Image (cartoon, helix red, strand yellow):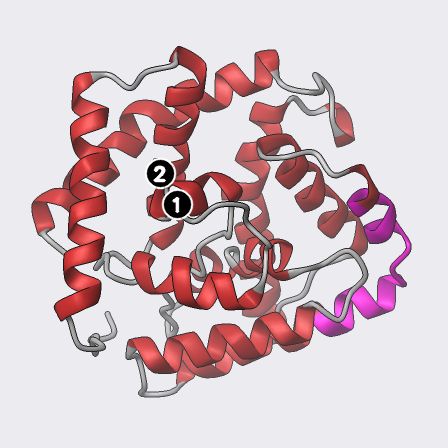
Amino acid sequence: MDPKVEEAVLTCRERLYGTCVKDLSRNGRKQVYSDNMSFEDLDVWRRESMPEILRARHAEKQTMWLEKAELAKLMEWKLSRGKFRPTLSKLIQSNDPDKVREYSEQAFKVMIDYCDSSNDDDNEFTTTVRKSIDLVCQLRGVGPATSTLILSLAGPALRNSPDASLRDTPFFSDEVFDILNPEYGKIKYSTKEYFELVLPKLLLFNTRELQKIEEALWCLHRANKISGKLDGISAKLLTSVHETVVDQLVTAPPSKRVKK
């Protein structure tokens, strides 16, 4: 990935993300969520509070998991940030709390074990993400997209641990899929789409904070939806992302990265 393009994408996130979240909080489907939160509050909980909770669990128990109420809040966030699918919340609520903990803990353990290994190339990371997705998808209402939202919490939680470092599993959002695959057509939310059309393209970015790349691309999509037209800087950036992703997917071999 061209460092200048990557820097511009991350700068775009810093410039637009707060504004886009505030706009969605004011004009979104709901005004109040769990625990009397606004969408803006819910987004802060997802980005900051929930990774901190997982980090504390890992520090104390050397493992991480989700409680059922936490999974329900993640689904609230997902359905409010993207397309609304009312049956998903009901399916999430039908899960046994012990199963939510069991399968989420197993999925996070795969990622923790990967952190502790010496392998950190794209192929090994992709294999790890696939194994984790298969585990957490055993929960009702959790498909490939929701599973990546759950797993996106692992990177922020583990990067601040003394002996662990992990790249983010970027969220499989409708908006980012559209940005990365503008000619694709209707999305099916399949693991095949994620591993062929989303994750390889986002892994071209060098940052370990790949969720910030997802958020930047979501901002571009959201800004275009709000105004009907991207400003000159954003439109030029979107063109650069498309050109860079296509060029590098054609020419670049799988990369091996050094843990930091």
Q: Circles 1 and 2: CB distance less than 8 Å?
A: yes
Boundaries of the magenta span: 88-103
Residue 71 falls left or right of residue 194: right
Residue at the spot of label 2: 217
Identify the residue at horizontal 37%, vertical 42% (top origin): 182
Q: Is residue 108 visible?
A: no
Q: Is residue 158 magenta?
A: no
Instruction: Tell me where residue 73 sits by quadrant.
Output: top right
Judged from the image, the secondary structure of the residue bearing numbered disc 1 is helix
| Residue 155 sits above or below residue 222 on the image | below
In this rendered view, identify the residue nearer to me: 225 or 256. Answer: 225
Disc 2 crowd rating (10 Å Cα; few below 14, some 14-19, many 20+) is many
Identify the residue at horizontal 43%, vertical 49% (top origin): 184
The x, y position of residue 172, in whole percent, is 51, 52
Residue at the spot of label 1: 214
Instruction: Tell me where residue 90 sits by quadrant.
Output: top right
Residue 15 falls left or right of residue 115: left
In this rendered view, identify the residue nearer to me: 77 or 224. Answer: 224
| Residue 197 sits above or below residue 82 on the image | below
Residue 113 falls left or right of residue 181: right
